[in-house]
Image (tube, grey):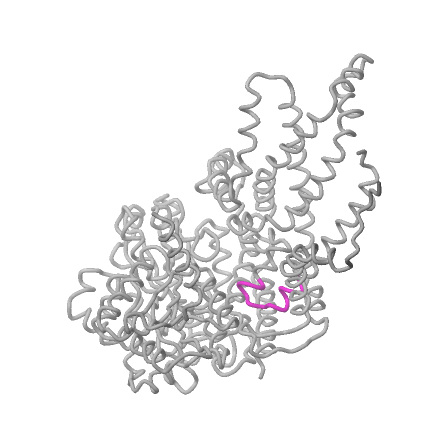
Amino acid sequence: MNRRDILLGTSGLLAAPFIAPSVRAQGRTEIQFWYGLGGALGERVAEQVTRFNESQSRFRVNATFRGSYVEVMTGAIAAWRAGTPPHIAQVFEVGTATMMAAGPAIRPTHELLGEAGITLDPKRYLAGVRGYYSDTQGRMVSMPHNSSSAVMWVNLDAFEKAGLSTTDLPKTWAEIRAAAQKIKATNAAEMPISTAWPTWVMFEQMSSLHDVGLATKANGFEGLDAEMNLGAPIFTKQTNMLLEMQREGLFVYGGRDGDGFASFPAGKAAMSFNSSAGRAQVQREAKFRWASVVLPYHGDVTQSPRNGVIGGASLWTLTARNRTAEEYRGVAEFYRFISEVEQDKWWHHVTGYVPLTLAAYEASRAEGFYAQNPGADAAIIQLSRAEPTPNSQGFRLGGFVEIRNIIQEELERGFQGQQNTETLLGNANRRANVVLRNFERANRR
Amino acid sequence: MQRKAIFNNKLLPYLLLAPQLAITFAFFFWPAGEAVWYSFIRQDAFGISTQFVWFENFTDLFADPLYHQVILNTVIFSVAVTVLAMGFALGLAVLADRHIRGKDGYRTLLIWPYAVAPAVAAILYIFLFHPDIGLIGRALKAAGVAWNYTLNGNQAMLVVVLAAAWKQVSYNFLFFLAGLQSIPRSVLEAAAIDGASPLHRFRTVIFPLLSPTTFFLLVINITYAFFDTFGIIDALTKGGPGNATQTLIYRAYIDGRVNLDIGSSSAQSVVLMIAVMALTLVQFRFIERKVHY
């Protein structure tokens, strides 16, 4: 390499930062997309974007992995404050309230599509998915992208060893407890029950299934002045049961967030709870027969549990001062593309997330996908088996990340034997209300 | 000949100082000033609406009983890490200072942990102490100890203290060893001829002569425990179980970055800033007097 090349190279490097972020490369409008899925799922996102880029020649989406969901969200917010946000940011479901309160920073999906002249009927989307990301008038504010629901995972080998039926799996918590006692008595597995995402599974999903709000004001959908509702009998029942099962050695607490699930694919836990998107991991690692089924309910509270709530993330369109109509158009086209039945079906099959649209679900069923992959539809059934009520459509609570952690912390104190159910729920309720009030004050306009 | 340098030009000294001052301003005073400003306001995550709330972020903070626990955690954690890291390092340095075969090898090996990133150190400790996958953790459980740091707060504190101290031992060792080597042999020989036992020599000769090193390391270690242990706590316990291993810096991170509460996070940074300033002042005012240079 001679000096001239080096000089040319350096000048290129120097010039690079000064090129506007959305130049037309080869005549294409560039769309920046930040996502927070790593590993195999991250590769699927990159593939999804490639499929879009190859499907047309007017826009190019540049997808960048920006770390965890938390990092993507804080990074996108910081970038917006600095005036250089990406066009699209993937934000996890607990960040929904914060994003929705961000007024001028976001371009609601229904507006975006309207301006681009694209009509996407909200009714095309699964009810549980649509509801979570819609405003009170039923208009979609963010674009559903990757949604899952919590399901129960069962180690069928352990069930057989304990002399339990491997076809008639437990449906209620009472049946689960009985099965766990049998597993413990016969020593069929190291631990009868474990769980990932303690707050999401044990509180949020149970709130939805039993049609009892986690908070007032329809879980925050109807206003920032919502208050926590952890004093409701269902949460006392649920917490009592968990603490008792832990004391009896039936339930083993495995840590916060996703940590508690590692025991299932390793063959240590006979039953576990996790996102339906954990399917790929189980398929790859589990060296035993397993099944994924819908979540259990309290049979003495209801006989017909309602829909579960989703987890996962949606896509938010961020505004910027110099953003052109063409760029917004590109974002809208990308949203339209990923909602196409073919694309949605592909996404559902390769990731384990639920399909966004009913049509993709129907198409998958017609193709026999669920006959070949039993249990892959457990989450979809759970999400769509009932029309969502105000208590089961999702959560719109400010500072929800913090509230989830507060419930986890207080649960840990309970598992340590430091506090009983009443104090545990009382403390969690009080601390979470402080978070809600702070969010309300900070976002009052 | 005049030895004092005289600048006739009044501007020149400022000009020469300017680069240094500019860096200090841009990287220290400006961010610190921003933190102070943000600690007086309440703002949504996007910074769209801002209210000036005077000291409300601070009063909210100190009214929170959990913050009191976090302060207590930080004190326990910092004292334990400092004492352990410095104690071990001093012991190792004294041993490595003796004439033994292959001492260069020992010394090199003892310095290695310093090159380990905090998150990696934490992973190492997970593989050692985790109740299900850890080597020591499983051995403890097999021996009948109810070992589970994911649910036992004291055990969790013990593990993060051990990991944090282990990482700092190398640094301390290096300085203690250099300190020991700079002590004139003649002084020690004289003491030995006068009949002082090795322990007596250490207490009355070596330790006082090491005091500048010890004092320097005390300041460094406390600052380390306060600010640089974030990665270890995040990877090992995430501040849990409950809030048992949450320290001031970890909570400031969680509130600012995860919970997006910039006002409270900034107030916590200001508290931290004042605490460290006070601590350093105390150290230089009172402890330094006992230091022999």
Q: Is A173 situated left or right of B50 in this image? A: left
Query: Residue A124 at x, y = what percent?
Result: 27, 80
Q: Is residue B271 visible?
A: yes
What number of labels is visible? 0
Which residue is depicted at the point 79% across and 55% down?
B8
Q: Residue furthest front?
A: B1
Name the quadrant of the C terminus of chain A: bottom right
Q: Which residues are magenta?
A: B255-268
Residue at (53, 53) in percent of width and height: B238
Which quarter of the figure has residue A131?
Answer: bottom left
Q: Position of residue A226 (x, y in %)?
A: 54, 78
Query: Is residue B142 covered in magenta?
Result: no
Give the main secondary structure of the magenta stretch.
helix
Task: Point out residue B14 in the picture as x, y percentages from the top left corner.
Answer: 73, 58
Q: Is residue B57 above or below residue B277?
A: below
Q: Nearer the viewer, residue B17 or B25?
A: B17
- Looking at the image, the residue that sits furthest to the left is A367
User: Closer to the camera, A152 or A167?
Assistant: A152
Q: Considering depth in this image, is A440 or B85 the residue closer to the camera?
A: B85
| Residue shown at 67% from the left, 68% from the top | B39
User: In the rendered image, is residue A213 in sight?
Assistant: no
Q: Position of residue A399 (x, y in %)?
A: 53, 70
Is residue B175 placed above or below A143 in the rendered structure? above
Occupied quadrant, residue B2: top right
Left or right of A286 in this view: B75:
right
Q: Is residue A321 above or below residue A366?
A: below
- Asked whether, in this view, residue A11 is left or right of residue A277, the answer is right
From the viewer's perspective, is residue A217 above or below residue B206?
below
Drawn side of residue B64 relative to residue A310, left or right? right
